[in-house]
Amino acid sequence: MKIGIVGAECSGKSTLASALHAALQNSYPSVTVIAEYLREWTALHGRPPIAHEQEHVATAQVLRVQQAQTACVVIDTTPLVTAVYSDVLFHDSSLYKAAVVFQRSLDVTLLLCLDLPWVADGIQRDGVAMQQRIDTRLREILLLHRLPFASIYGAGPKRLEAALRAIDQADATRRIRRPTPQGPAWTWTCETCSDADCEHRMFSRLTQAHSVRV
């Protein structure tokens, strides 16, 4: 079971990954969290990566996932987030192709919404405006490439509960149907209206006035 957590800076990705590690222990014989390689890289170099270093960060994260030998892998930030930052900050869209392929290989993608207070975490300190730009672009890419995802809202236990429901749904579908070349077999449905296209329509209305770059 491969669970990818994506979201803009300071959206609670690492906190949720840690909570999921504890919560999933009773559901899987072994659970591993793949920590965000960006944090390690930044601590080593004392700065965020610049344009030509983004690909290394994304590749290293993928390699760590591939090396995991456990029944359940929780990925704290996937290469898709790195690709979005590379696009928004450096106008480089070259990382999208590989990032989308990797994202399709996951069993569930959890998109963390911006309903928590923004707090600088030592890596990204660009503020709320940049956080919103990244969130918008990330949603555009997910929808553009028809990558299934679950929007995770709430704080503390509520956020964890929402994530676990999405994982349970994805796991149940995975046990029944094998993934296809086009992507995972599961589709997230909105808890409020039970409409699988709800997220797509809601966000499309917000971005219909803007053209989507490939």
Image (spheres, rainbow, N blue to C red):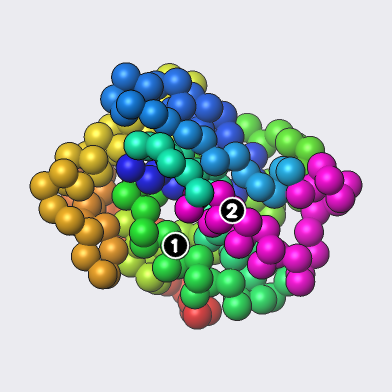
Tell me if I can see residue 201 in this picture: no
Q: Determine contact: label 1, label 2, CB under 8 Å.
A: no
Vertical placement of residue 89 versus 41, above or below = below
Residue for point 23% across, 40% down: 171
Relative placement, left or right, of 196 versus 143 is: left
Which numbered marker is on residue 102? 1
Tell me if I can see residue 212 in this picture: yes
Residue for point 21% across, 65% down: 180
Magenta span: 41-66
Marked residue nearer the N-terminal end (1 or 2): 2
Q: Main secondary structure of the magenta part?
A: helix
Q: Can you tell which quarter of the image residue 120 is in?
A: top right
Relative placement, left or right, of 174 versus 209 is: left
The x and y percentages for residue 145 are 38, 70
Residue for point 67% across, 58% down: 57
Relative placement, left or right, of 177 versus 161 is: left
Q: Mark 2 highlights which residue?
A: 61
Kind of residue at badge 1: Phe
Q: Quadrant of the N terminus?
A: top left
Q: Can you tell which quarter of the image residue 105 is in?
A: bottom left
Which numbered marker is on residue 21? none
Residue for point 43% across, 41% down: 69
The x and y percentages for residue 51 are 76, 69
